[in-house]
Image (cartoon, rainbow, N blue to C red):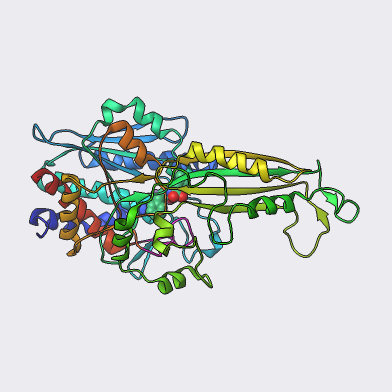
Amino acid sequence: MPLASDLEAFFAKNQSRARDELFDLLRIPSVSARSEHNPDTARAADWVAESMRRIGLTATVHPTKGHPVVVGEWRKAKPGAQTVLIYGHYDVQPAEPLELWDSPPFEPTVRDGKIYARGSVDDKGQLYLHIKALEAHLTARGTLPVNVIVLAEGEEEVGSEHLAAFIEDHKDLLECGAVVISDSAMFAPGLPSILSSLRGLAYFQIDVQGPTTDLHSGSYGGAVMNPAMALARILATMHDADGHVAIEGFYDKVRDWGEDARKQIRTLPFDDAHFRAETGSPELFGEKGYSTLERIWMRPTCEVNGLLSGYTGEGAKTVLPAKAMAKVSCRLIPNQTPDEIEHLMKKHVERVAPKGVTVTVTHLHGGHPWRADLDGPLFDAARRALATAFAREPVVTGEGGSIPVVGDFQRILGAPVLLVGFGLPGENAHAPNEWMSEENYFKGMRAMAALWDELAAG
Ligand code: BES
Ligand code: MN
Ligand code: MN
């Protein structure tokens, strides 16, 4: 079915304004990880609240111990109408390294149909397209077929530390029959996608302390344990030669997805050579016995995210470093939990740590994995709405990334969660030159406007 003509007319007429408004939001450097940007993050929260008030929602900016949570509401639908909750995040990742951007990260620029800016696709563009979809209904018809709650948070990129408690504390305010989130990517250009899984996360910092100070590597080297070497040895124990994680008990809770899931994954248009080229890696590598998509979607991992030790400046310096540090994160699969993996990681490191250094493992943040059965009216409505906007039936995909709050929504609000993203492969989220497809920004609005009609129609 084509999009209702009154909604289509609204979108056609308001396209350039929809882009200009998004650009205003993208100009605010709401980097949640950096306290020097706290005023910007607060400004982005206010901007989102104000953008909802402009179209007829009420909006409140709730302070938290971290960054504010914005809640918008519109509850004037006909009696008996459903209430839906739209979630997104207005915070962004740091833009560094700045010198690798072709245009400044907080000066949105369109090149080749792509909107380049930090946060364009993750997640400001995908959050704002929902607000535009609501505006289309409210402007064209003066009403919406569903009651709507919009929850926009400012701490997603730093682990959503205060969000679960916020949802618990505001259970009544947030009560709903469905949660809809656009914070992910389509499987391929032109191919709308519904997500059926996310991996969880357990993020650690490993600190290795040797001598109290850096030492001359000639005068002391060979006689005290080198922390960098000790750390390298610890990290080297985390996998076997076949790419399996070698932390004892790591796979105990992993539920096998079964042959049906593997078969379904094989129906998707995916090419290893193309994927390899996209990464620029000389060769693909992963756990033996699994395809690339299986490795990313249905297998847990343990990855080094960062390493720090000793002299890394120009030329040579003969020094034995006093300490070494690694950031290590595990992606999790049902039914692994961050708590359990924290326990196993600590036990493992304790067991393999060489003598002569002190090793501490700190759990920085975590999130539960998530997997859904895509049954029920919400998902049927989503399939129809996506087909309307993209003129193509959506596919069901998995995802290797994490959105920790998804499990919390399901657990605390008891509502099904629909994940429908409008990013694209190669979008450079978290990296220099992040972009969002302009076409997807506009089609995403149409799809979400259609969704509310489809959901109300049942
Ligand atoms: N939008 C992403 C989640 C995501 C990543 C969806 C990749 C689809 C593909 C989200 O903003 C994100 O970056 N999540 C973090 C987790 C968080 C706890 C820092 C992630 O996956 O690393
Ligand atoms: Mn995101
Ligand atoms: Mn992100």
Q: Is residue 78 above or below residue 329?
A: above
Quarter in which the C terminus is drawn = top left
Q: Quadrant of residue 337?
A: top left
Rendering coords of residue 108 (x, y %) = 40, 59
The kind of secondary structure the magenta stretch mainly shows is: loop
Q: Is residue 395 above or below residue 225?
A: below
Q: Is residue 57 above or below residue 284?
A: above
Residue most toward the right? Answer: 219
Q: Is residue 399 above or below residue 336?
A: below
Does residue 114 appear in this view? yes
Rendering coords of residue 9 (x, y %) = 12, 57
Front residue of this view, candidates 9 and 326: 326
Front residue of this view, candidates 352 and 64: 352
Front residue of this view, candidates 343 and 210: 343
Does residue 28 appear in this view? no
Q: Answer whether residue 431 is magenta in the image.
A: yes
Rendering coords of residue 427 (x, y %) = 40, 62
Q: Which residues are magenta?
A: 425-436
Q: Answer whether residue 457 is magenta in the image.
A: no
Q: Quadrant of residue 45?
A: top left
Rendering coords of residue 320 (x, y %) = 81, 52
On the picture, is 167 further left or further right than 81? right
On the picture, is 216 further left or further right than 330? right
Q: Quadrant of residue 121?
A: bottom left
Q: Residue at x 36, y 44 (%)?
A: 370
